[in-house]
Each structure stands twice: as structure tokens, then as C-alpha cells.
Image (cartoon, helix red, strand yellow):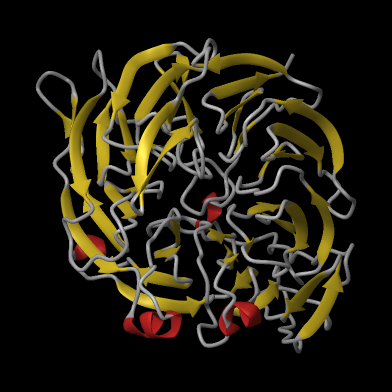
């Protein structure tokens, strides 16, 4: 309880809302210290925010894994940039403005003639893949007086470009298969890039030489037991010299990096796999009825807990607090959505989880639980704060990772709907539809501007400064090719790829 008074703790009964044709189930379960109305607030109202005591003593420095004060902020301070998928350990940082508020110009395209394509085999079927896809968000960062754009693509390569020109800074780094996920750039200033590939390896690559150099790789079959396959979609997190990464081998891994520099001044690593655990349990396999339990989302860390989900719908939290002193991580949270949960778990400043789940199996659990959820891990036996269903067909539900903006959670559905949801109550405040079929991109909001690409090949910008009003369209630019990848926003420009075979930069005119 706050010293300024006794706050009310309200547990409202389950309330079913029908908003915009979507069934919404809201449970007002708020921790002590929050203020809540006695009934869920209707669409168009926000939750009150408690004020901090004016004479509170300064807080002690945070000593755990991920400081709650960093929610919504960049990934550390040593490297300016957007360094990993959704920007920080809680997956809540979307880039830096200014942003284009009027129609931007097309700054460059890489390659100029397209052609980021390669053949790849999945489940016995070989097809051509082009451009970038889910999640595919580039890393954008400042180093040695220039801004870099680094991304993996479906041509099996990692590319290192000058953000001003779109020209190569370093030669491409080629892997043995396509790259679907987002790279991570070392947040502590070491000249290292971390990336997975469908060729079965997660790699650490040095960028302080004339060409990128592989320093280490982790094989998907290096641990046992494994299920599913050997791809690596997850964008790793580096915290205090540890790499945290989930794999489609269905295992979660922690690697001690032992970063440093050699006598020649070049960066070095001496990685050691210090922990791994299956991303599933026997109860999930029994309940789901199959072994489709790969970890395709990017793990999130809040305080001392790492959160991730798998393709069987199991959401887990593991306590890391004792790892650095020789202890073993322990599971502290478990929740089953019932269906494929590939979107990354997002954590707000109070520790609530925002989860997007797909609707493919259509089993009783996924029908009951819904596809857009807010969970309270402090209530492990009854964590659902609210949920929203998207079950109009199969497949349906959520592939894109939700975004947090002021008092909203923004979700997009594979069917093309984009929803602004009241974070306190689960009421849908607004909803609009994008053309082009499947929408897998994750919403990005910077400087009151929501950016969303559609599968018809158009990038859209909307004014969302008033969270109670419908988003106001600002501009749209037709690019061509399904925009499946999440854009990176950095200092006046957007960087993103499409399935047509190229990466694009749009900039303030």
C-alpha cells in the first residue's frame, strides 16, 4: 500500500462486453496500490493513475535483470538505437522520432533491383522465399559516426547498410538457409550482432573487421530433449553478459558470453551454455494432443523473471535471480492459452503481461480463453485480467506482438483488424480494418503515430494522440509486396522489408 493513503483493491466479477462485433471478457483484477473503478470502465474512459508521494526518498538502484523503470525506454544507454525486436527486454520500445507526419519520400531501396530471394525447404516442401517476413524488424543503431541498418533476409544473408544511403557498410554474411527473425545488436557496445537462421544455428558475429566474422554458433541439436525443428526465429536478449534465447527446438537457452577484446583490439567471446529447459511440460503435451511446441517468440524479461510462450500455447515465467551466483532458474508462472502463441509476451511497468494467441486448433481452451489477453503473474492461479476473442474463422487470432501506448494496448489480427484496447478494462475503444489479407506485422507507435503495413503492400500512418478517438489517417505509401515485417523507426525514417524482395527506407521529405 502507498504511504499517501489506502487504495482500493477491486475485484470485479466477469463482465462480457460486445464491442465492434468482438466478444470481450473483462476481469478487473488490480494489484494493491492501483486505483480502479468498481465496475469496468466503458469505452472512452481511462484508468486513474496514482500519484507518487512528493517526499518519497530516492529508490535504491535496481540490481536485478531488467529494471521496471526501463519499460518503454531504449535498451541501455551505451548504444543509441533500436537494438532488438521491439527495442528492449520488455519488448516495449519502438524507436525514436521525429517521425514522418506528412507523406514521406522513398529514400532508398536495397537491393535497388530487389532479389533478396532463396529456396528453402519446410516440412518437406521446397519453395522460393523473397524479401523479409515475420518478424524481420531491422536493427538501427549509431556507431562510428554513422547510422547502421542491419537485418537478416530470405536470401540467407545478414546485411549491414548505411542508413543514409542504403549502401553496404560491410559485405553480406551468408548463412545456410533463410532468416526470418530480427537480429540483436549488443547493447553494451561490443561490436557484435546476434542472429538465428533456418540452417539450425544461432550465431554471434563480429562487425569490427573488414568483413563480418562468425565467432560462435549454437546448434539447435546441442541440447536434449528437443521437439519440432531447428529454426531460430527469436530475437535474443543480452543482459549482464548473458544471452537469453528461445529456439524452435522447443528449448529455452541461457549462454554466458564472456565478452572481451583480444591483444589485437578485436572483440572476442567465449560462450558457455549455462542453462536450458524445455519450453513445454508433460501436461501441455497431454492437453494439446501434439508436439507442436516450438518457441518462435522473442523472450521478455521483467525484474528477475523471463517470460516466453510456445506454439502449443504454454506461457511460462522463470525466476533468474539466483543464476549469477550459482543458482538454478525456477519456473514461477504457467498459463495455457490452448493455441499457437508466437507473438512475443509484452510486459508493462507494473508487471502485467500482454499476450496474443492464434486461433487455429479451435479447441475448447482457446475458445474459452480468447486471443488477446492481459495476464497478472502475481495471481498464478487466476491470472486473466481480461481477454478478447477473435474467432470468426480458422485461422484467426494474433501473430503480431501487441504494442503499449499510454492507456492502450494495440493488437492486430491475422484477418486485418487493428484494435485499440483499454489496458485497464479490456474494452475495445476503436477498431479499423486493413486490406490485403493476412496481417502479421507488429504495431509500432512513436510520437503519437501508429505505423501499420498491410499485405496489399501499403504502409499506413495514423494519429493516435487522443486514445479515446478513432485513429486519424495521416498518410499511406504504396510499396508493393506484403509488408509482413515490423518497421524500425529512427530519427525521421522508417526501415522495413516486404515479401517482394527488398528493404525500403521512407524518410521525412
Identify the residue shown where x is 43% and y is 65%: 310
Q: Position of residue 494 (x, y in %)?
A: 63, 27
Based on the displayed image, in which of its 4 quarters is residue 7 positioned? Answer: bottom right
Q: Tell whether 191 sits left or right of 360.
A: left
Identify the residue shown where x is 27% and y is 46%: 241
Residue 322 visible, this orientation: no
Residue 429 visible, this orientation: yes
Q: Position of residue 211 (x, y in %)?
A: 25, 17
Q: Position of residue 226 (x, y in %)?
A: 24, 65
**Quadrant of the rendering where the N terminus is positioned:** bottom right
**Quadrant of the rendering where the C terminus is positioned:** top right
Identify the residue shown where x is 74% and y is 69%: 424
Furthest-front residue in this view: 125
In this rendered view, identify the residue nearer to me: 267 or 195. 195
Q: Is residue 139 above or below residue 341?
A: above
Q: Tell whether 210 sits left or right of 389.
A: left
Q: Tell whether 330 sits left or right of 305.
A: left
Q: Position of residue 46 (x, y in %)?
A: 83, 63
Based on the displayed image, in which of its 4 quarters is residue 253 positioned? Answer: bottom left
In this rendered view, identify the residue nearer to me: 222 or 162. 222
Q: Is residue 242 above or below residue 210?
A: below
Identify the residue shown where x is 34% and y is 57%: 248
Amino acid at each position: 500500500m502507498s504511504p499517501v493513503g489506502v487504495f482500493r483493491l477491486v475485484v470485479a466479477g466477469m463482465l462480457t462486453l460486445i464491442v465492434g462485433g468482438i466478444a470481450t471478457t473483462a476481469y478487473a483484477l488490480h494489484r494493491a496500490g492501483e486505483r480502479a473503478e468498481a465496475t469496468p470502465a466503458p469505452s472512452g474512459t481511462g484508468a486513474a493513475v496514482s500519484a507518487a508521494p512528493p517526499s518519497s526518498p530516492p529508490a535504491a538502484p535496481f540490481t536485478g535483470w531488467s529494471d521496471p523503470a526501463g519499460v518503454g525506454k531504449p535498451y541501455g544507454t551505451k548504444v543509441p538505437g533500436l537494438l532488438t525486436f521491439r527495442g528492449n527486454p520488455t519488448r516495449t520500445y519502438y524507436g525514436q522520432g521525429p517521425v514522418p507526419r506528412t507523406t514521406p519520400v522513398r529514400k532508398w531501396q536495397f537491393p535497388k533491383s530487389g532479389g533478396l530471394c532463396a529456396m528453402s525447404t519446410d516440412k518437406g516442401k521446397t519453395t522460393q522465399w523473397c524479401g523479409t517476413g515475420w518478424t524481420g524488424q531491422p536493427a538501427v543503431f549509431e556507431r562510428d559516426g554513422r547510422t547502421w541498418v542491419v537485418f537478416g533476409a530470405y536470401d540467407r544473408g545478414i546485411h549491414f547498410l548505411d542508413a543514409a544511403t542504403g549502401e553496404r557498410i560491410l559485405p553480406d554474411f551468408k548463412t545456410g538457409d533463410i532468416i526470418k527473425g530480427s537480429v540483436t545488436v549488443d547493447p553494451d557496445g561490443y561490436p557484435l550482432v546476434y542472429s538465428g537462421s533456418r540452417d539450425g544455428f544461432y550465431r554471434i558475429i563480429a562487425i569490427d573487421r573488414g568483413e563480418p566474422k562468425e565467432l560462435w554458433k549454437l546448434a539447435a541439436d546441442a541440447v536434449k530433449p528437443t521437439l519440432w525443428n531447428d529454426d531460430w526465429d527469436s530475437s535474443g536478449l543480452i543482459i549482464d553478459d548473458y544471452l537469453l534465447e528461445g529456439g524452435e527446438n522447443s528449448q529455452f537457452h541461457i549462454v554466458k558470453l564472456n565478452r572481451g577484446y583480444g591483444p589485437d583490439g578485436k572483440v572476442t567471446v567465449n560462450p558457455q551454455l549455462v542453462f536450458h529447459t524445455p519450453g513445454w511440460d508433460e501436461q501441455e503435451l497431454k492437453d494439446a494432443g501434439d508436439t507442436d511446441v516450438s518457441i518462435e517468440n522473442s523472450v521478455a524479461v521483467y525484474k528477475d523473471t523471463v517470460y516466453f510462450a510456445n506454439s502449443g500455447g504454454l506461457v511460462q515465467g522463470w525466476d533468474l535471480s539466483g543464476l549469477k551466483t550459482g543458482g538454478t532458474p525456477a519456473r514461477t508462472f504457467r498459463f495455457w492459452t490452448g493455441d499457437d502463441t508466437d507473438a512475443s509476451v509484452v510486459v508493462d511497468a507494473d508487471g502485467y503481461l500482454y499476450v496474443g494467441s492464434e486461433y487455429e486448433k479451435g479447441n475448447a481452451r482457446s475458445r474459452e480463453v480468447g486471443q488477446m489477453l492481459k495476464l497478472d503473474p502475481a495471481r498464478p492461479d487466476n491470472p486473466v485480467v481480461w481477454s478478447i476473442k477473435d474467432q470468426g474463422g480458422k485461422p484467426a487470432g494474433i501473430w503480431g506482438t501487441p504494442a503499449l501506448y499510454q492507456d492502450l494496448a494495440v493488437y492486430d489480427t491475422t484477418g486485418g483488424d487493428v484494435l485499440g484496447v483499454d489496458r485497464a478494462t479490456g474494452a475495445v475503444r476503436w477498431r479499423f480494418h486493413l486490406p490485403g489479407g493476412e496481417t502479421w506485422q507488429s504495431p509500432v507507435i512513436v510520437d503519437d503515430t501508429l505505423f501499420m503495413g498491410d499485405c496489399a503492400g501499403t504502409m499506413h500512418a495514423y494519429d493516435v494522440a487522443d486514445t479515446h478517438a478513432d485513429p486519424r489517417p495521416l498518410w499511406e505509401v504504396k510499396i508493393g509486396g506484403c509488408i509482413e515485417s515490423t518497421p524500425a523507426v529512427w530519427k525521421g525514417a522508417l526501415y522495413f522489408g516486404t515479401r517482394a524482395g527488398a528493404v525500403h527506407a521512407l524518410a521525412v521529405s
